[in-house]
Image (cartoon, rainbow, N blue to C red):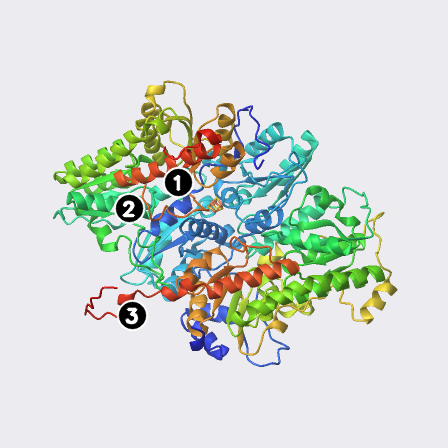
């Protein structure tokens, strides 16, 4: 057994986190920064943070993850990191020539109280940040929230610090896609395209974190939302934020500051959440939904109904980020499955409430915890076994010990490919998720079937 | 592609090219860490090392915590390693280093698959985290009843004034198990190296010497600085056992606290990674009288010579004969493999930028299959790892190193037991026996090559553009940037998914791996047909 010390008996813990279902803010900010074209994310702290974030993102995407660090030493942590950040700007703009640098802080620079806003002002004033170049920044204290919070903070910074209002509408809809895969961002744009809605989607890591092999390394690959587009988000007809945790702050900031009206919806994972997304796009942009979209919806519905015998009543344990888990849970319920243990590591009171809403038909029969951890999830599973586990890569240890079919979903996925290329949002994404779920369940049925019941036809 | 390679490029030119793109002050700093090997005369070559990384430069380096928790303590299975800090550090160091472990039974302790953290929140930062730390230790004890718990400090811990050592003492007293802490905040030192030192100091202070049981074996040694990445430690141990040599402990691949507690009973320390652990070897010698030698089990020649060194130390003919027999037996398949892959690899070129010893140790494996090492450097080494131990007295201690504690070690009152008398040591040394000797990387480097310490992203790019190597070795962060060029990239920290590469058996794996990487056909398909031939005239045919 790999998790041999995990007991079935659950003791309440107040201080000790075991096998977390979250990580720290800065990595989310770094990921968001990578979704701007020509951007070099910068980590204002010890170089270890930056190394850890780059490593984890690299393993998840199998793509170059470029980011710089202020390389704090003991001296900097006593006297403040201003000199380090100024030096970093000089080095970065001279040597790496990005169009924009997206600075996030770390628990170190937050604890010592560096005023990044002041430092950036100074750097602009004295030309360390060259004319025509941009620096955006956000505090990302790692002792608050999670990687999702960091993502949200950086996305908000992009909007607030770059958006302008000319007063002339650009006819576009802003979409903040949430902490999702580049493949998901492509899919959201495709759906909007099918509806004929012009969008500015930010951040947009497609093209950057699922780039091609060409024989040339590009420090700033094709792809990403451009600085110009970000500026023009202030002139859009409206904003749709997908996922309350990751995207609400950005679209609300645009609403309050530049009067771009906003809506916040669940991530469009699964049938119903995608319905709401499409409907929101349709109403915000004032367009009608073409048959091609309705056709895709019908296909997803068709497969779900075909495969009911394999889905109905199956118990599922899920861990992941709140926006993902809420939509995913709803999708599972839609398909007749029964999510019984549900954990997110990211704090936020609304989580339990939303999960209760989407699982209402099962009453109080559901274990939900936010913030919780994978250790707790594992203990719940030991007490009430499940038919399927959906989790990031770390779930494989639970899946192996308990011999449960396992579908990898979320962040990080360190041991498989596909997430950057095949979406899980939209109707097509739902189909892809469903294929993975059914594959896991039906492979298990085949594996365990006695010879006389091993069947060609399922 | 090999045809166009020009590894006759002048390394001085490359250095100039590299520095041209830096702000002047940065260029001056970096110049000291970039050393062209322009002639065969290498005496006096210097490589600046273990100095601060310039902010903004895009370094490979990590932090003190990573060196302490990830590298040194990560591979020890029977201890709860509790990270005191916000969740990130503990999360990123959770199962990400590929150090394998093999508990002796299904119910033996193994906490390596777990991540333990105090997950500090803002109120802990404001009001102090000691209370939460104590509670976390108590909860860990209540749930798991471990024999030991250690506490790792992350960046904010020192700044808010949490005293992890006082908490450790209090809880040790209360719970009656071994509990100790590390002040390994990320900003300490200039790289992971500081963390190695801090980790080893604490193990030496709190664990080594707790168990005096002497293993019943004639030739027993410790293997220091071997972390069992991809199973390296397993194959080295098998090899040693085959020769009749037993490991009392490994620092710290596949290790347990019990082994550390007992390591002072070994008769020789064999040091693999000089950087991360030479001071432990020194301390074990001063306190307990155990001599140390440098070894390497990477590459068949080094493996054979290391075995011979160990056997010569014990001056036992039976052991010497046994070692020779094992070498002869193990060498045969290695030679056969070299013969098989060499024709496909000969003449190709490699570069390696990793760690504090591997960029040196791995050069032999490439040369064995006829390849040239164009450029190499370490990520967190010190000058002695390049220039050899003779420079140690000349190394200036700067502000960043001064804060890393050096333990004052005295011979143990009762247990100091020189394994060899002064005369015996001298006699061996006179025969050329290399106690405490390490000449560093420089002697390996050929004329025309370039040494770069703490290489940056920009320098990596320049090297690739100018040298056009056939294979590049570094870590995960560099991997895909290199491969986008169409150049295969081998991770020499975590070995990608491969290994073991140590010992004779590992060498065979490594040769196969390099052969696979160099000769995989995928790199030929970078261009689409319409890119090669963009003409727009269709030809129709039936077949
Ligand atoms: S928790 Fe703090 S020190 Fe650790 S990686 Fe995150 S920001 Fe860096």
Specify the subunit that label 1 lies on.
A
Q: CA distance from mark 1 to mark 2?
A: 15 Å
> In this figure, what is the number of numbered marks?
3
**A325 and B501: which is toward the camera:** B501
Specify the subunit that label 2 lies on.
A
Where does residue A407 sit, x and y in percent of width and height? 41, 37
Kindly identify which residue carries mark 3. Answer: B532
Marks 2 and 3: CB-CB under 8 Å? Answer: no
Q: Is residue A238 left or right of residue B405?
A: left
Q: Is residue A302 left or right of residue A291?
A: right
- The residue carrying pointer 3 sits among few (fewer than 14), some (14 to 19) or many (20 or more) residues within 10 Å by Cα, namely few
Mark 3, ligand 1, within 8 Å: the answer is: no
Q: CA distance from mark 2 to mark 3?
A: 32 Å
Disc marking residue A185: 2
Q: Secondary structure at mark 3?
A: helix
Seen in the picture, residue B172 relative to B231 is either above or below; the reply is above
Where does residue B264 sit, x and y in percent of width and height? 77, 49
- The residue carrying pointer 2 sits among few (fewer than 14), some (14 to 19) or many (20 or more) residues within 10 Å by Cα, namely many
Q: Are marks 2 and 3 on the same chain?
A: no
Q: Secondary structure at mark 2?
A: helix
**B385 and A282: which is toward the camera:** A282
Where does residue A122 sit, x and y in percent of width and height? 35, 57
Where does residue A13 sit, x and y in percent of width and height? 53, 27
Instruction: Tell me the mark number nearer the camera, choosing from 1 and 3.
Output: 3
Specify the subunit that label 3 lies on.
B
Mark 2, ligand 1, within 8 Å: the answer is: no
Q: Secondary structure at mark 1?
A: loop
Instruction: Tell me the mark number nearer the camera, choosing from 2 and 3.
Output: 3
Q: Earlier in the sequence, mark 1 or mark 2?
A: 2
Kindly identify which residue carries mark 1. Answer: A410
């Amino acid at each position: 057994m790999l998790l041999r010390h995990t007991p079935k008996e659950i003791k309440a813990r107040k201080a000790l986190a075991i096998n977390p279902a979250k990580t720290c803010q800065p990595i989310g900010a770094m990921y968001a920064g990578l979704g701007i074209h020509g951007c070099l994310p910068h980590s204002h702290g010890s170089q270890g943070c930056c190394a850890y974030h780059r490593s984890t993102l690299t393993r998840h995407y199998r793509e170059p993850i470029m980011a710089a660090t202020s390389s704090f030493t003991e001296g900097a942590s006593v006297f403040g990191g201003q000199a380090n950040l100024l030096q970093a700007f000089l080095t970065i703009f001279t040597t790496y020539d990005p169009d924009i640098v997206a600075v996030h802080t770390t628990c170190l620079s937050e604890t010592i109280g560096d005023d990044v806003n002041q430092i950036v002002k100074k750097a602009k004033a004295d030309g360390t940040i060259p004319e025509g170049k941009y620096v955006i920044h956000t505090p990302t204290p790692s002792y608050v929230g999670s990687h999702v919070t960091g993502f949200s903070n950086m996305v908000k910074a992009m909007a607030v610090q770059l958006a302008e209002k000319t007063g002339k509408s650009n006819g576009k809809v802003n979409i903040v896609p949430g902490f999702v895969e580049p493949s998901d961002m492509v899919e959201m744009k495709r759906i909007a395209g099918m509806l004929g809605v012009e969008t500015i989607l930010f951040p947009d890591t497609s093209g950057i974190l699922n780039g091609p092999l060409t024989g040339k390394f590009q420090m700033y690959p094709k792809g990403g939302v451009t600085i110009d587009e970000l500026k023009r988000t202030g002139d859009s007809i409206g904003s749709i934020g997908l996922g309350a945790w990751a995207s609400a702050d950005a679209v609300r900031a645009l609403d309050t500051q530049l009067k771009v009206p906003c809506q916040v919806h669940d991530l469009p994972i699964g049938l119903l959440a995608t319905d709401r997304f499409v409907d929101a796009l349709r109403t915000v942009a004032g367009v009608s939904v073409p048959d091609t979209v309705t056709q895709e919806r019908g296909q997803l519905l068709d497969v779900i109904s075909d495969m009911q015998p394999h889905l109905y009543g199956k118990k599922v344990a899920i861990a992941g980020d709140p926006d993902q888990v809420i939509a995913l849970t709803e999708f599972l319920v839609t398909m007749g499955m029964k999510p019984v243990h549900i954990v997110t590591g990211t704090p936020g009171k609304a989580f339990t409430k939303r999960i209760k809403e989407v699982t209402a038909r099962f009453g109080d029969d559901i274990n939900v915890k936010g913030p919780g951890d994978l250790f707790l999830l594992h203990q719940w599973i030991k007490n009430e076994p499940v038919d399927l586990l959906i989790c990031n890569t770390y779930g494989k240890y639970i899946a192996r010990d308990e011999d449960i079919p396992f579908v990898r979903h979320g962040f990080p996925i360190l041991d498989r490919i596909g997430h950057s290329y095949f979406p899980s949002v939209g109707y097509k994404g739902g189909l892809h998720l469903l294929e993975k779920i059914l594959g896991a369940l039906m492979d298990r049925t085949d594996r365990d079937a006695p010879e006389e019941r091993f069947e060609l036809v399922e | 592609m090999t045809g166009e390679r020009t590894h006759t490029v002048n390394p001085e030119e490359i250095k100039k090219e590299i520095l041209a793109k830096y702000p002047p002050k940065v260029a001056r700093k970096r110049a000291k860490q970039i050393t062209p090997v322009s002639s065969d005369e290498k005496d006096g070559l210097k490589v600046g090392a273990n100095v601060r990384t310039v902010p903004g430069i895009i370094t490979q380096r990590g932090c003190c915590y990573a060196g302490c928790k990830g590298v040194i303590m990560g591979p020890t299975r029977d201890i709860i390693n509790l990270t005191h800090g916000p969740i990130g550090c503990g999360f990123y160091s959770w199962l990400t280093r590929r150090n394998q472990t093999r508990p002796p039974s299904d119910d033996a302790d193994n906490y390596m698959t777990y991540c333990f953290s105090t997950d500090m929140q803002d109120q802990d930062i404001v009001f102090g985290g000691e209370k939460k730390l104590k509670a976390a230790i108590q909860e860990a004890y209540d749930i798991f009843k471990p024999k030991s718990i250690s506490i790792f400090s992350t960046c904010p811990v020192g700044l808010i004034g949490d005293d992890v050592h006082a908490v450790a003492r209090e809880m040790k007293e209360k719970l009656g198990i071994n509990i100790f802490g590390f002040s390994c905040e990320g900003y300490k030192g200039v790289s992971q190296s500081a963390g190695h030192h801090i980790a080893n100091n604490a193990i030496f202070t709190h664990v080594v010497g707790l168990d005096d049981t002497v293993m019943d074996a004639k030739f027993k040694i410790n293997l220091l600085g071997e972390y069992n990445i991809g199973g390296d430690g397993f194959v080295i141990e098998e090899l040693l056992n085959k020769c009749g040599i037993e490991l009392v402990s490994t620092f710290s691949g596949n290790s347990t606290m019990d082994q550390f507690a007992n390591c002072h009973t070994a008769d020789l320390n064999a040091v693999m990674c000089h950087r991360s652990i030479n001071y432990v070897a020194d301390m074990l010698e001063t306190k307990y009288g155990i001599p140390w030698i440098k070894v390497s089990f990477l590459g068949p020649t080094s493996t054979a010579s290391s075995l011979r060194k160990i056997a010569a130390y014990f001056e036992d003919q039976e052991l010497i004969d046994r070692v020779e027999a094992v070498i002869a037996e193990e060498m045969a398949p290695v030679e056969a493999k070299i013969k098989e892959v060499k024709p496909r690899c000969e003449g190709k070129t490699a570069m390696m930028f990793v760690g504090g010893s591997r960029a040196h140790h791995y050069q032999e494996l490439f040369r064995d299959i006829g390849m040239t090492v164009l450029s190499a450097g370490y990520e967190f080494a010190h000058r002695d790892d390049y220039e050899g131990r003779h420079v140690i007295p000349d190394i200036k201690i700067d502000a960043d190193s001064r804060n890393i504690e050096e333990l004052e070690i005295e011979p143990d009152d009762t247990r100091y037991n020189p394994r060899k008398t002064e005369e015996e040591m001298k006699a061996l040394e006179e025969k050329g026996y290399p106690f405490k000797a390490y000449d560093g990387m420089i002697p390996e480097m050929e004329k025309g090559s370039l040494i770069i310490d703490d290489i940056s992203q920009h320098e990596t790019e320049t090297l690739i553009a100018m040298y056009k190597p056939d294979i590049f070795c570094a870590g995960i962060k560099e991997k895909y940037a290199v491969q986008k060029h169409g150049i295969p990239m081998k991770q020499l920290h975590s070995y990608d998914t491969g290994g073991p590469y140590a010992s004779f058996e590992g060498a065979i794996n490594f040769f196969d791996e390099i052969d696979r990487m160099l000769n995989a056909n995928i790199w030929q398909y970078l261009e689409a047909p319409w890119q090669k031939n963009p003409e727009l005239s269709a030809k129709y045919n039936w077949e």
